[in-house]
Image: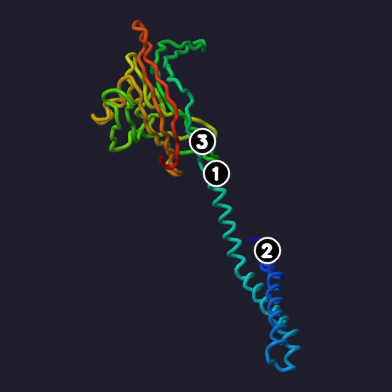
Amino acid sequence: MQPMEILRFYRECLARAFTGKFFLIEKWSGGLGLLAVVATKFAPIPERWDGMILDDLPLYFFLLIFLSTVFLGFITAPYSIYKEEREKAFLLQKAREPKLKVFVGDTDGTREYTGLTNQTIGGMRLTTSIYAKTHSAVSLVVTNIGETRAESCTACLIWFERLDGEAAGEVELFEPILLPWDFTDTEEQLRCSIDPNTSKRVWIADVNHNGWLWLMRETERLPPNYQHIFGGTGRYRAIIQISDGDSLSIQTKVEITCTGNEDDNSYLGGVASISILEQASPSL
């Protein structure tokens, strides 16, 4: 530490030691003086002690308490400064932490495409074999509104229920089911990093031509009892938990509606929609 910094530090300690002490102790001395006046008027005190009690006692009391308080304040000032700086650093760190915001980007299911792109010798590119990877997929958008990257983000289905039909009711899940962050590679993109001020979509389910809504995971990578989530045409409610592993998780309850395609000659897929019912952190 440089000499000027040391001098500035002790000057701050001295300023803290004196700050707010004078008027506080002056009030205490005034109270003692009032008690002294009452004592000299009504108590059997020798006359030669009247002057000492009325004049000297409040003065000596003020000096003693003032100097003692200033000394203690000077001794404890370094710890107070350290505590304040540590609190500032903690608040700054909290302000810079990743903050995830979860919302619906498309209330209607989206049709996502993939294709093969070739480049000619001359440098021109041609995209062929374009086909729909999803029919009417529902998703949530996760945005990092913090100042640092959110590492290892995960999205899990932790609860769902069917609202109508013969199989209506809650379906018990013994463990969360990871959801993908990429519709083209659902098994290798179960975790992701999100930079500040950027967004990623987490994919929940896709509906086929006849209105069957299925979780966007490869069936063989799931346990047998989880290979039939969600099901046929109807309404479903689900809770999606999103976390970056460090800050508090966010749970979002959504309602998903799916129907088949009314055109029997069309194979563009069914129709799905999604809406947010409620949201809480860390849990609903």
Q: CA distance from mark 2 to mark 3?
A: 40 Å
Whether residues under marks 2 and 3 lie with C-beta atoms below 8 angstroms apart, the answer is no
Over which residues does the magenta segment extend? 7-11
Displayed quadrant of residue 240: top left
Q: Is residue 121 magenta?
A: no
Q: Residue at x 35, y 5 (%)?
A: 265
User: Dot 3 corresponds to which residue?
Assistant: 144
**Quadrant location of the C terminus in the rendered image:** top left
Q: Residues within 10 Å of mark 2 (few under 14, many from 20)?
A: some
Query: In front here: 82 or 202?
Result: 202
Tag 1: amino acid: Arg
- Among numbered discs 2 and 3, the one appearing first in the sequence: 2
User: Dot 2 corresponds to which residue?
Assistant: 12
Tell me if 185 is positioned left or right of 103 in this view.
Answer: left
- Among numbered discs 1 and 2, the one appearing first in the sequence: 2
Tell me if 102 is positioned left or right of 39 in this view.
Answer: left
Q: Position of residue 268 (x, y in %)?
A: 38, 11
Residue 114 visible, this angle:
yes
Q: Position of residue 280 (x, y in %)?
A: 45, 39
Tag 3: amino acid: Asn
Tell me if 137 is positioned left or right of 168 in this view.
Answer: right
Displayed quadrant of residue 58: bottom right
Q: CA distance from mark 1 to mark 3?
A: 11 Å
